[in-house]
Image: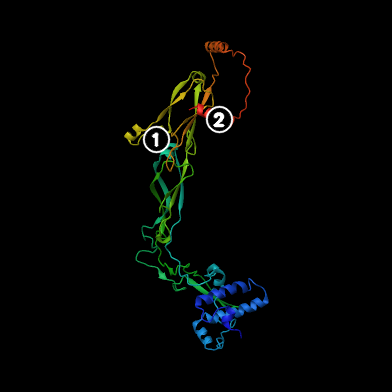
């Protein structure tokens, strides 16, 4: 190789190790045979790699700078130079080669964080609206009480793996046109831990954790909705080796209510009134959602809580009329409260005795409604019509 090695890499003679490595990575990404099949590029890649082999080695570089032949000892590229596969993979991935190739990772720890856990909890609508504390039972991994997470039998300790000597990795060397390719793989004997437990704990079989059923109290904040998840920090699965626990997520399922339907923070209900009450007007005392709250709450607080409301049915109220009670819906998680929207449905009697029928016929005669013609109208109201109706009902 007659060309100057510094020129091959495109660096100055006073370039430091990082600059040399950066220059080599850049050229390797352009010239590697897997990327560039051009024979000239492959030949140049060999020379570039030889240059990097010399300039990345302080002793060989010093010998070369003094005018010596760095390959005089039979170390030329492709001739048993001991060129590391890691250097090539660094050019593409900037670190250890994929699939375990590379170096310096060391043994993996036995103690790791546990996984998060998820359970579902069904609650009533009033509990979702105003909050509740519920007791739940969860089955998760917990730290082994016998070995306290160590995974070893009493009086014993892990021993260094005799195969990898504590490194957690074993090297495999293969020869190719690139020279010797050295790869590191997790040690099969110790599964990459670097140590072996000769006498595992009889309770957890060396894992440092066992499965157990626990009872927890979970506080559900007011305003949660169906599908909301409540996070309980570090109440999930304990990690291997007695590692820190993950989090527990409680997913809320809100049961269907017999009266109210929730839409966001608003509540909807239907109120049926007799035909005569709709015509003459009346006031109905109806329950609010607060009436469903458990009576075990503080007595004074419950005494101050409004549990009913008076719905005024004005004379001549039509079926389908909506009345909005401001601030009687569901409290929001971030403050405020939705509305309660009551839809009035006028019930027409289906069975009349003789006297009732007589009175109704008399009323129809008085109102000139013995043979009504009926009035056809569009089912779609204009924007102004809807606004007029909305303001007229308040």
**Residue 51 x %, y %:** 57, 81
Q: Secondary structure at mark 2?
A: helix
Instruction: State which tag comes first along the sequence, 1 or 2.
Output: 1
Residue at x 56%, y 72% (from the top left corner) = 91
Query: Which dot marks residue 3?
Result: none
Apparent side of residue 366 relative to residue 231 in the rendered image (left or right): right
Residue with the mark numbered 1: 293
Q: Is residue 94 visible?
A: yes
Q: Nearer the viewer, residue 144 or 245?
A: 245
Query: Which dot marks residue 386?
Result: 2
Q: Secondary structure at mark 1?
A: loop
Apparent side of residue 35 relative to residue 208 in the rendered image (left or right): right
294, above or below 362, in the image: below
**Residue 67 x %, y %:** 54, 89
Q: Nearer the viewer, residue 280 or 92?
A: 280
Apparent side of residue 180 relative to residue 239 in the rendered image (left or right): right
Q: Nearer the viewer, residue 217 or 94?
A: 94
**Residue 131 x %, y %:** 40, 40
**Residue 187 x %, y %:** 49, 70
Q: Nearer the viewer, residue 161 or 332?
A: 332
User: Quadrant of the image for the N terminus?
Assistant: bottom right
CA separation in Å, label 1 and label 2? 36 Å
Residue at x 52%, y 86% (from the top left corner) = 65
Q: Residues within 10 Å of mark 2 (few under 14, many from 20)?
A: few
Q: Residues within 10 Å of mark 1 (few under 14, many from 20)?
A: some
Apparent side of residue 217 relative to residue 75 in the rendered image (left or right): left
163, above or below 137, in the image: below
Number of marks in the rendered image = 2
Q: Is residue 343 visible?
A: no
190, above or below 329, in the image: below
Q: Are marks 1 and 2 in contact (CB under 8 Å)?
A: no
């Amino acid at each position: 190789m007659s060309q100057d090695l510094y020129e091959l890499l495109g660096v100055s003679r006073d370039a430091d190790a990082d600059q040399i490595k950066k220059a080599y990575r850049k050229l390797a990404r352009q010239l590697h045979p897997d990327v560039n099949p051009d024979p000239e590029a492959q030949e140049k890649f060999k020379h570039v790699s030889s240059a990097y082999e010399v300039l990345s080695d302080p002793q060989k570089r010093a010998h070369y700078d003094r005018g010596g032949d760095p390959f005089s000892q039979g170390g030329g590229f492709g001739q048993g130079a001991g060129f590391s596969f890691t250097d090539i993979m660094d050019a593409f991935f900037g670190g250890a080669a994929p699939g375990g190739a590379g170096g310096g990772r060391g043994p993996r720890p036995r103690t790791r964080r546990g996984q998060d856990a998820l359970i579902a909890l069904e609650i009533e609508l009033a509990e979702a609206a105003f909050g509740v504390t519920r007791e739940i039972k969860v089955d998760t991994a917990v730290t082994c009480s016998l070995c306290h997470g160590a995974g070893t039998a009493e009086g014993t300790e892990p021993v260094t793996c005799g195969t990898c000597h504590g490194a957690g990795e074993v090297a495999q060397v293969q020869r190719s046109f690139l020279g010797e390719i050295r790869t590191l793989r997790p040690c099969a004997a110790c599964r990459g831990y670097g140590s072996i437990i000769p006498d595992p704990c009889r309770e957890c079989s060396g894992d440092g954790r066992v499965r157990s059923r626990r009872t927890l109290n979970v506080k559900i904040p007011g305003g949660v909705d169906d599908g909301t998840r409540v996070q309980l920090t570090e109440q999930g699965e304990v990690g291997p080796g007695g590692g820190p626990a993950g989090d527990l997520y409680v997913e809320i399922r809100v049961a269907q209510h017999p009266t109210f339907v929730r839409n966001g923070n608003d509540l909807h209900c239907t109120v049926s009134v007799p035909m005569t009450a709709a015509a003459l007007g009346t006031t109905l005392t109806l329950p609010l959602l607060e009436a469903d709250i458990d009576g075990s709450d503080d007595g004074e607080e419950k005494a101050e809580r409004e549990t009913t409301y008076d719905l005024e049915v004005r004379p001549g109220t039509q079926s389908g009329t909506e009345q909005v009670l401001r601030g009687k819906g569901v409290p929001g998680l971030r403050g405020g409260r939705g509305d309660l929207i009551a839809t009035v449905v006028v019930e027409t009697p289906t069975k009349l005795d003789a006297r009732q029928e007589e009175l109704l016929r008399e009323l129809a005669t008085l109102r000139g409604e013995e043979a009504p013609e009926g009035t056809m109208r569009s089912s779609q109201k204009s924007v102004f019509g809807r606004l007029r109706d909305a303001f007229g009902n308040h």
